[in-house]
Image (cartoon, coloured by chain):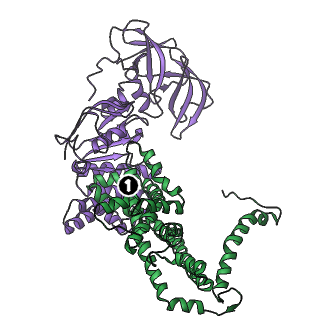
Chain colours: A green, B purple
Amino acid sequence: MEKRSVFGNRLLPYLLLAPQLAITIVFFYWPASQAVWMSFRIQDAFGIATEFVWFENYTELFKSRAYYEAMWTTVVFSSWVTVLSMGTALLLAVMADKQIRGATAYRTLLIWPYAVAPAIAGVLWLFMFQPSLGMVGRSLRAMGIDWNPLLDGNHAMILVILAATWKQISYNFLFFLAGLQSIPKSLIEAAAIDGARPARRFWTIVFPLLSPTTFFLLVVNVVYVFFDTFGIIDAITKGGPATSTQTLVYKVFSDGRLGGDLGGSAAQSVILMAIVIGLTAIQFRYVERKVTY
Amino acid sequence: MAEVTLKAVRKVYAGNVEAVKGVDIDIPDGGFCVLVGPSGCGKSTLLRMVAGLETISSGEIAIGGRVVNQIEPADRDIAMVFQNYALYPHMSVYDNIAYGLRNRGTPKDEIDRRVQEAARILAIEPFLARRPRQLSGGQRQRVAMGRAIVRKPQVFLFDEPLSNLDAKLRVQMRVEIKKLQRALGVTAIYVTHDQVEAMTLSDKLVVMNGGRVEQVGTPTDVYRRPATKFVATFIGSPPMNIVPGVVAGEGSVSVGGHVMAVDDIRAGLPKGAKVDIGLRPEDLVVEPGATDGHPLIEVDFVEELGATQLFHGTLGGAPIVVQCPTDKVPTTVKRLALSIAPTLIHVFDHETGERIGRTFGSVAA
């Protein structure tokens, strides 16, 4: 009972696809190919002469200590954000899944942060934790903690992790809640009769059955932390103090835009692009097949 | 092994919706009790209250003499088979069956011995390493049974366990469930909306409607002496015909002008009182050739069932179905003369729908 439309005109399907193709070409393929092209070239400081240098930009990059530092920063940052935001979201989703009073309001409120633009989220947290003005910042100092994200790299890192986590919880929450609700109730009841207490039910039944959702979110979150947190970092720390919150994607921006090293910056973007293509490939391969029951 | 006692059990949901309106049932040790009724009659809710999956609004449920109202499902010593089997999809068949024992800290070799034994009884030994999704409906059903019997509980609870199977498998599993329950001697409560399952499995049949128990009795009791018009039309296939009639005198009623003798009717009913007469299609006898002194029906159409034929027509203004062995009368017949034994006529109150029998009231439970 397959429903299919047959086009009489051979041109029509291409015409219908054209707008979407145009958007993809203009906003994705064109800049991406520009980046690849640029990553093979070096421009002089005044932008007058450009030289084709093959892989020199890449070899320079892998010799640079700063690049490895940014990589490590990204690993630390993304691990924390992924673990914290997924953990918190799962906890909230489990609570929302129970029949509680005002569940709808609770859910709606939890979804709101997702609608906040990254830069605004960043500014929000920046203000709250500002050491001399922010409510939280001042209370921390009043409690005797020498809180200063403007000077202390670790404090700055904590702040961006918190902001990025807060922003991502909503998304994870939605997926976890949907995942929880797709688990048949009778499975939980059967486990209850089988003598499993709530905690054991969660770890032996619910959590394994959520694994497709968890895996999907893991990939999505890593991609999010790698790329979409640019706005948050830019608003809160601008990669600083020093380079303590400079992630790979922020380094692309600061090297290319602020440092003027277009070739090196382009090479970094190509590497990032390869990473995201790899992650997407993994996701399609495993989410679609293996982790489902 | 244990008896199960329900005393004035009620379930009221939020918004004052009363799903179960005071139910009393006694199930003896080793008994097979079937709760049957249309959708929404409260039978599943009642079962879930026995299991501990629903709270009890008021009343008392006792298993083996112990009141279980406040006891967790895990500690009630029951096992339940769900309609969708509720097998854990990420575990092998072996782990599915062993799960309940593991949760209770049973020693490993003991678990293995009992799982193997259950698998042998249910003939699922070749599938122990498989996942539930690799099994057919009937095999999944067996695994669900295995999960129930491996714990050797005091009570089995079945929530429409056969409704997801095809007709042939359903008959086969029905027989197996009954055999298994007999062999193990475990008390069973079984919920179904299928009256054939209800009749064949139960030794105590509970017919429910609208949150109330309409009748409790052996299947034969319920079939032969339905307590209400509802039970009369719910149990039996094709359903019992209900035709309007009046009391014609002591021990007789009149339907469409024909006076019929009735065995089971209360004495002293006023002559001319409106009653409903219940006549089972299989109890009506077609009298070929006869015309006088028999109720006549006009035949509208005939259904062929193979061994029997169903004649649809009207009697006393009400639709009526007559079941007749094939070839007794030609299917082209326009009129049928009927007779019925006085012992097979059921009389119900026109208003309340309750049976107006001589001894009724003492038959229940």
Image location (x, y in percent) of residue B274: 44, 11
Query: In this orientation, which residue lies closer to the viewer: B215 or A96?
Result: A96
Left/right placement of residue A270 relative to residue B31 reads: right
- The kind of secondary structure element at disc 1 is helix
Q: Position of residue B350 (x, y in %)?
A: 43, 16
In this view, B52 is above or below A30: above
In this orientation, which residue lies closer to the viewer: B240 or B37? B37
User: Which residue is farthest top?
Assistant: B271
**Residue drawn at (40%, 51%) of the image:** A97
Q: Chain of mark 1?
A: A
Which quarter of the image is occupied by the C terminus of chain B?
A: top left
Residue A238: where, in percent of width, then height?
50, 72
Q: Residue furthest left?
A: B65
Mark 1 neighbour class, 10 Å CA radius: few under 14, some 14 to 19, many 20 or more: some
Choose between A50 and A102: the one closer to the eye: A50
Is B234 placed above or below A40 here?
above
* Residue B160: quarter of image: top left
Residue B87 visible, this orientation: no
In percent of width and height, residue B353 lies at 40, 20
Q: Amino acid at mark 1?
A: Val
